[in-house]
Image (cartoon, coloured by chain):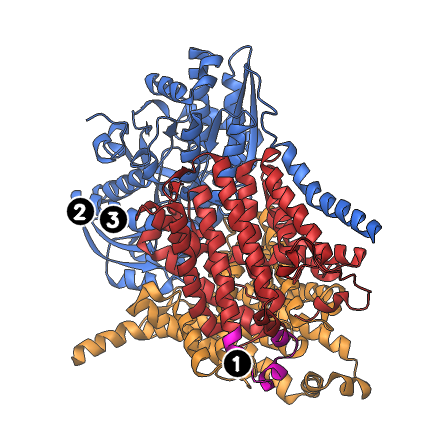
Amino acid sequence: MTQDRRSLLKTVAAAAMTPALGAGLSALPGRARAQSNTIKIGVLNDQSGVYRETSGPTSVACVRQAVKEMAPPGTTVEVVVADHQNKPDVGATIARQWLDQDGVDVIVDVPNSSVALAVNTVVREKNKVYLNSGAATTELTGGQCTPNTIHWTYDTYMLARSTGGAMVKAGGDSWFFITADYTFGHSLERDTSNFVKQAGGKVLGSVRHPLQSTDFSSYLLQAQSSRAKVIGLANAGTDTINCVKQAAEFGVTRRGTKLAVLLMFIGDVHALGLKTAQGLVCTESFYWDLNDRTRSFLSRVKGAVGDNYPNMDHAGCYASVLHYLKAVKDMGVGAAKASGKDAVARMKAMPTDDDCFGAGKIREDGRKLCPVYLFEVKSPEESKAPWDYYKVLQTTPADEAFRPLGEGGCSLVRT
Amino acid sequence: MAVQASALVGAPVNDAPGLLGLSGFGFNRAQSITFLVMLLLVVAGPFFLYPVLLMKLLCFALFACAFNLLIGYVGLLSFGHAMFFGTGGYLAAHAAKVWGLTPELAILVGTAFGAALGAVAGWIAIRRQGIYFAMITLALAQMVYFFYLQAPFTGGEDGIQRVPRGALFGLIDLRADMALYWVVAVIFLAGFLFISRVVHSPFGQVLKAIRENEPRAISLGYRVDDYKLLAFTLSAALAALAGSAKAIVFGIATLTDVYWTMSGEVVLMTLLGGLGTVFGPVAGAAVIVLMQNQLAELGAWVTVIQGIIFVVCVLLFRAGIMGELGRLLKVRL
Amino acid sequence: MLEDLLFQLQIGLPQVALGLVNGAFYALLSLGLAVIFGMLNVINFAHGAQFMMGAFVAWMMLSWLGIGYWPALILAPLIVGAFGVLLEKTMISRLYKLDHLYGLLLTFGLALIIEGVFRNQFGSSGMPYAPPAALGGPPVDLGFMFMPVYRLWVVVAALVMSLVTWLVIEKTRLGAYLRAATENAALVQAFGVNVPRMITLTYGAGVALAAFAGVLAAPIYSVNPQMGSNLIIVVFAVVVIGGMGSILGSVLTGFGLGLVEGLTKVFYPEASSTVIFVIMAIVLLARPAGLFGRA
């Protein structure tokens, strides 16, 4: 009896504590405070789910490249990586532990709006630095803007403005939308419609489909019968890919209708294949074959990224970390580590310049400004090299591409 | 699922009465001791482990216990429990953020809506049993998922963000992690003891009778469907309670918590810990939550490892951690 | 009024035709589930993952070995079916004496593993797969709409496959053994029929049906690791609506719900994802055993 009870106690305690200890070691308060001359950069993105290609390991490679090029002398720069699994609570927990206990100074990338916003709150609370490149939500520089956050690469407003406005200029003046039925889709559709109308075009109609539909033929037929010149796809990921694939199957574009994809990365084009994707129109703020500087950037990271060429999200990870390290060099490691707010303020005060986006600047609401390109996907005959996929249709200059400072409702903007 | 209950049959089981008045919850001596150990871990935990992580663990442990109430004692496998967990989260977050309620009221709102949804979903689902029941709950949960995806108040894929933790009863500020931890710990322990009490009440005995032999329970004059529906609603309410608490802890409520993968996760936790055991769900939730936390730094293999755990548990380890442990020690845990 | 009706018809008819295409996939998948369930009493949660494997095996054959669509349509189901046989032999067969729910849990775990491995290997953005040259031509004019040739083929192929399955089960000696073993396995075994082997082959056949649907889907849908997991939940609802009593029932329900869903996409697209679940709830309230189920 007594024997039983004692061994029971032991076993129960052991069973309960073994996993706990494993996890606990990294979580013990006060352990692993980084040394004062070490900068620790945490790349938090999707390493296993739907955003693995558009962020994932290639983002990490790009961050490491920036570290290689710009690490301040006399300091060590460490890069740590975690998979947020597209779960906001997982992302927020990792961010908290990184900032509280592991001495991480900067969190980079963070695709997926819900995770991005959750991390945004945590970073502000801990007064560190948040360089978001992967998320599309304009909230990061709007209602939920913080003095610790820089939103580097793109957002829904900029996508809508470039694709909607520039398309009309290129002759596509009547639109029909196929929209994913949730906030992201709705706001893309709303913003794009506004720009289409502003530019003198008209919107003939729209249809909303549930997220993660497999069959889009019905919506495509409805779009086709509207006789619009442009079918705008206000959705993302596999929805977009299925849509484009089935549009090709039904020969939607054969009769001169253009398919404008509001959110697409070059990796999606790669996945679709040029035969299916040719003629698509989409917006990115970076393309590896834009100019000599972007080509030089590609040649430097090519060894590390394999057959997944960097898209704008990846380039944004590189450029934002590069600029952060510049600011650190400028203000000193101690000061940069002491206050994320100060580091971000310094970053905003300095003009940006890098091989991916060229010269630019960061606005007071945390929005990084850069020129934005409307691309058309090449046909298989036009494509001469691997990943030779885009040709530029229109360029929107940096100061027109993003939401005007006053319209976002960011509390950091003095009116 | 009569199987794991009979896993213990055959071995002589040491069923000495419980300690210190804990027998009121139906605990035998071994369970009383385990409970005290658990209590100790809950109290001492935040001094060794990261409190936010522990709060998450407790929320999931309560969620798994709620799920276990249904599978372990009524024999109904729900593959859609995320709908209640998520409903609790969304409603509590909305109540705290938009209506400005204090956290305890927000959690109550979440729980109440979860119970209401549970009553409706249960009313539909209990018409079938076994595999059909699992598929029906899965389908209903998917429907609820689409509802939250499209409903304006949930913020779609952004979720409800920056939910204030607020002040308990309007008095005690919960912004400090440790303050909130004690609240969550109390919620968890209260929920846990409530379930134990229910299971060992006459009501719980009828549930077990239904699980073992439904026709006989009917012939004894029990209105089986009413019992099942009540158990289903209770389980849903407790799952929603766990979800509400989690929303307050993290200050967010998002689609993750209503998606079918979350329903799968709670099944996994309970299976790993031991279906139908008192402490199994807690142990299972602890292992899975800590594992997810550790694997976050490894990256890509989380789902594969979870799948492997499923397969291994079903093939070799059906009694789960607590079931096997109990067998080893010849006690019921 | 009449004009209005004609207009509704004009947009309605194409949707009916398209609904049939989706219905073809529901029918094939629920058919596979029903075949497996009838014999093994296991709900094969890995059905969606095996559907995905079919599409991926076709893709691998094309891009690694240069084997085209037509051979893949035969070979991929055989390969994936063989994989199914392996799963049954090594794992699922151990569970027959236990509660049926363990089969569900096991196959759920298998689905997670398969999907995870494919995601690690191939990423999640999907693979291109072109329809075969013979069916890839421009859409044909059906009078009321232009329909890609390939979609017509999908409907035909699904119907033929369903018919073949029905014939095998209802009209052949093998089918007779199967039906008998479903009723009383011990007795059939006593007559000298190797029941365990029959069970194994049934599972393999059900899995092969899923893979067949996967190959059919590859040119239309994005070939990615999660292509099956969302579809399978809808198919579960289809199965609940139809009841798993009969082969014919699952085929009819599959096509029928495809039609209903197609029409919803025109008249109230916001509900097209939920309409099948709503129908499921209504059917459960009115007729818990399902439309074709035995109580």
Q: Quadrant of residue A368?
A: top left
Q: Nearer the viewer, mark 1 or mark 2?
A: 1
Q: Which residues are magenta?
A: B209-227
Image coordinates for residue A253, horizontal then vertical, percent:
33, 55
- Quarter of the rendering occupied by the C terminus of chain A: top left
Q: Position of residue A113 (x, y in %)?
A: 40, 42
Is the stretch drawn in magenta largely helix, strand or loop?
A: helix
Instruction: Give the residue displayed 62% in from the left and 47% down from the top.
Output: B286
Dot 2 falls on a residue whose secondary structure is helix
For residue B223, which numbered disc appears in the image? Answer: 1
- Please say if C88 is above or below C194: above
Q: Are marks 3 and 2 on the same chain?
A: yes
- C-alpha distance separating marks 1 and 2: 63 Å
Q: Secondary structure at mark 3?
A: helix
Crowding near the residue tagged with mark 2, few <14, some 14–19, many ≥20 C-alpha atoms within 10 Å: some
Q: Quick one: SS at disc 1?
A: loop
Chain for colour orange: C
What shade does chain A have? blue
List the residue tagged with mark 2: A197
Three-letter code for the amino acid on which mark 1 is drawn: Arg
Number of marks present in the image shown: 3
Is residue B185 shown left or right of residue A412? right
